Amino acid sequence: MESPFDDHYYMKKAIAEAELAFEKDEVPVGALIVSKQQIIAKSHNLTELLCDVTAHAEMQAITAAANYLGAKYLRTCTLYVTLEPCQMCAGALYWSQIGKVVFAAEDPKRGYRAMGVSLHPKTQVEFGILGKESRKLLQEFFDRKRL
């Protein structure tokens, strides 16, 4: 029997976090970290609220997950994030040795792959799950900014 807790389920939760960021006038990126089918950390961009360029959704989630586990390595965890991580977040993910990264929308200009950055060699990567929904939210946010 297939578990109801699949990548789509968790990505929907990450999109809900992105919607919270949108409501706060933050770039709508949401992230959560799962261990053993349990959400152990969730966040969204907080760069405006905290006046901190490092307060990306992924960075907030990595810190929360490490605190929850009481460990700096996240080898058995999966990150779900609505936008491809930037090079800064990819560096933090590399050092956390996260087991898997699943992102919704690709970022061909600022994503870690475009910047030539690698994740940890043992990290599995999947992308495109609910990518259309994530791109739509980002597009709406930036369309409003251009008015």
Image (tube, rainbow, N blue to C red):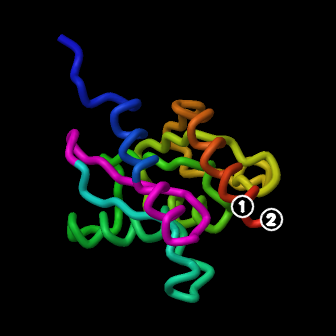
Q: Are marks 2 and 1 in contact (CB under 8 Å)?
A: yes
What residue is shown at x 58% (from left), y 43% (from top)?
Answer: 134
Question: What is the quadrant of the C terminus in the image?
Answer: bottom right
Q: Which residue is mark 1?
A: 144
Q: Helix or strand or loop: what does disc 2 sit on?
A: loop
How many numbered marks have been drawn onto this rendered protein structure? 2
Give me the disc on residue 147. Answer: 2
* Residue type of the residue flagged with mark 1: Arg
Q: Say whether residue 95 is visible.
A: no
Task: Give the image location of residue 129, x and y in percent.
Answer: 52, 31
- Residue stretch in magenta: 17-38
Between 57 and 139, which is closer to the camera in this rendering? 139
Locate residue 29: give its quadrant: bottom right
Residue 31 falls left or right of residue 66: right
What residue is shown at x 20% (from left), y 41% (from top)?
Answer: 36
Task: Give the image location of residue 144, x and y in percent.
Answer: 72, 61
